[in-house]
Image (cartoon, coloured by chain):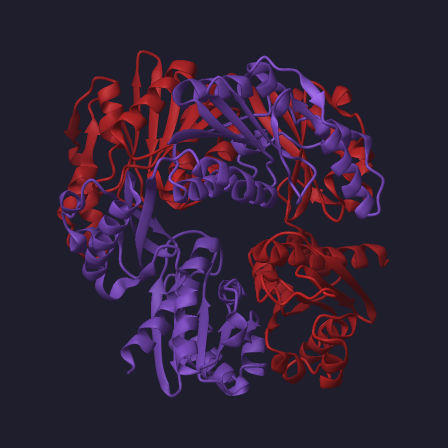
Chain colours: A red, B purple
Amino acid sequence: MKLEVVTIGTELLLGQILDTNAAELGRGLAAAGVEVVRHSSVADRPDAIRAAVAEALERTGFVITTGGLGPTRDDITKREVAALFGKALELDAAVLQSLEERFRRLGRPMPAVNRTQAEVPAGATVLPNPRGTAPGLWVEDRGRVVVMLPGVPSEMRGLLAEEVLPRLAARTAGVVVRSRSVRTTGIAESALAERVGAIEEEIAPLTLAYLPSTDGVELRVTAWSLREDDAERRLAAAVAQLRERAGEHCYGEDRTDLAAVVLDQLRARGSRLVVAESCTGGVLSARITAIPGASNVFIGGVVAYDNMVKSGTLDVRPELLDQYGAVSEQVVSAMAEGVQRQFAVDAALAITGIAGPSGGTAEKPVGTVWLAARHGAERRALKRVFPGDRNEIRARSAQAALDLLRRLLADKP
Amino acid sequence: MKLEVVTIGTELLLGQILDTNAAELGRGLAAAGVEVVRHSSVADRPDAIRAAVAEALERTGFVITTGGLGPTRDDITKREVAALFGKALELDAAVLQSLEERFRRLGRPMPAVNRTQAEVPAGATVLPNPRGTAPGLWVEDRGRVVVMLPGVPSEMRGLLAEEVLPRLAARTAGVVVRSRSVRTTGIAESALAERVGAIEEEIAPLTLAYLPSTDGVELRVTAWSLREDDAERRLAAAVAQLRERAGEHCYGEDRTDLAAVVLDQLRARGSRLVVAESCTGGVLSARITAIPGASNVFIGGVVAYDNMVKSGTLDVRPELLDQYGAVSEQVVSAMAEGVQRQFAVDAALAITGIAGPSGGTAEKPVGTVWLAARHGAERRALKRVFPGDRNEIRARSAQAALDLLRRLLADKP
């Protein structure tokens, strides 16, 4: 089964927000065996919305839209889709009632503007949205389907999982679109390609893509419209081959987060982790604590942004800071040792570097980062010079620090 | 001037990565007076790429693509666009030489796969890419233009700024597409809409959009294809009206980050800031340190994920944790006071809460967060119950903590 996604919002075309809904839809639909063959974004303009939805319907007969269902005047998706199907908008008593109840529960009067959210195209199926005020709408006529979902990500996600995917599952006749991936870090795309070699013919009809990011390079294989068991079997074989060729650079599969891998390694040893961050200023801690259940391994850390915190809280000797500078092997090692000792735990990570845009020198250019990892008395330190802007350098630093500890733990029996 | 953007990559349709390039292009082009009328994403498949680029060319005559210029086998954009224009791919000696030099500088041999990156459609203008191995390509024939940019965000961004925008500026005859926005937080979209009222007619031909996110609701006004001075004048008037109606909920304009606003407030008073985070686990520190120049105000903080860090490093009395629980007014206030005292600075923020997915109770459901702000002896604490998943709750908590300090400082003469 194939369909198109149309995300609606002038802010998307102007780049004011990232289109996370398109990505969420892509993931959820592929997992359910539905192939998104094209995604389009258009502005909150009647003619643009109508043209994009009509063209997408023409190509695939099935369109999911997001956005433009809110209570304000720029929310016009419903009207345009209704017009495309030649249907009127009608007030839905059940939707109005649930809106009124929602506001009653919140203890606030319902603003008059919200009343328009109870209007639906004649004959549409209303998809209840317990997370917000805009219900989803499923309009189907002579084999053509448009499903309209709200643009608020958490509401879209809930409606997709609870209302849309179950209905689509009934339509896909046993074939799936499914991807698996092998995640690597610490190796460049072209070097990885040389290691992997000409594997494409061997794994056909699966396709392979190299996806570089600040986390490293992901090797993604995809099975298109195969029967589920066939897809799974071929994907498992391809993943095994790719893992073997990627070797020690592979840290996991699919959506595995390196932070989760390291937490699992530490949990298995009964170790607890602390971190000391300078240039990443909390990015590493935030990465780790984004993992549900991090709290039984990660106990906390110190953001030592100012040198006063490095010497005060982390006990880095001021002479080291003076003699070698804050971005040095000596200081990063002392930070890791200091935080490990202060919190009296097995494992520690430390980062200090120059994230830019200013602060670089000829000897230590922007992107220069020192990383340290400790487990018990075992310790490693590593210098990297990362490309990219401030945010990319910070993200690459956090990933590289986690990878340093992963490799240390993997090498330690 | 109008154009379309086509981002290429199966990983985009499968939702494996966010399409940050589309957003970057939208921002950069709008600022240069170029309206992106549609953005499409297609898979790394010859027919899909060719159809999407051909249709976009048909509608606007000008297309920018990203992706599919790398050294690996899934990189086929160049071939398809060349075919669409009826041109052959030819080896470009200058590109080959610069590739070879690049690898020489890195001290590595050039993998054979990179050689294909020196092939360009006959007659194309090569846009040099000092950040990576794939140059941009500008193909123009009988009034139709396709500009191909690499998919790696930092490379795309550099080529856009240095090669594409200057060439486009020469083509836009004095009209611009320009947006301004008023950023609010601490007020719901429909309540804000009631305060703002029916302003659309007053500001026409500008358009208004309400953009809710975990940061709050952004009010965005856009001028479409007006002369620059006219657009600026109308936008400034609309922004002034919107600011007045949004009142105390407005914390800034355009891409202003609330963290930068708070850093500025503190800088003006010569105050320095520390933070103590529990459920946000580094997100607040990372938000603050994402701002270049944060280091002259923000000195650091403590991620007190485990209660042992709350009582040990932050001096929260264990009786408070036992009696009221870690998510309570008493504990958040003690965290703020403890971190302020330990680092001996004026300003402090603290957060403790339940980000989920587990850990909620009937009395303290997932999303319950206590926030505290201090400046000197002035202090505030606030409880909020946020909707959303773990990441959204953490992001909303960081924003609300910053807003608590912003309001405290704004109210303090």
B140 up-or-down from A292: above or below? above
Q: Point out residue A154 in the picture as x, y percentages from the top left corner.
A: 40, 45
* Quarter holding residue B8: top right
Q: Position of residue A15 (x, y in %)?
A: 42, 43
Instruction: Tell me the residue at 71%/78% (across/down).
Output: A338
Residue at x-position 30% and y-position 45%: B228
* Residue at 31% in and 52% down: B181
Horizontal side, residue A289 vs residue B186: left or right = right
Q: Nearer the viewer, residue B314 or A359?
A: A359
User: Which is nearer the eye, B174 or A105?
Assistant: B174
Whether residue A409 is visible to the viewer of this picture, yes or no, is yes
Examine the rendering and report whether any part of residue A229 can be seen.
no
**Residue A107: image location, x then y, percent:** 19, 58
> Quadrant location of the C terminus of chain A?
bottom right
From what the image shows, is residue B321 above or below residue A39? below
In the visual, does A195 lie left or right of A153? right
Total marks shown come to: 0
Say if A368 sits above or below A28 in the image: below
Horizontal side of residue B92 vs A91, given as left or right: right
Q: Quadrant of residue A213?
A: top right
Horizontal arrangement in the rendering, residue A86 relative to residue B76 (left or right): left
- Whole-percent x, y for residue B348 in the image: 45, 78
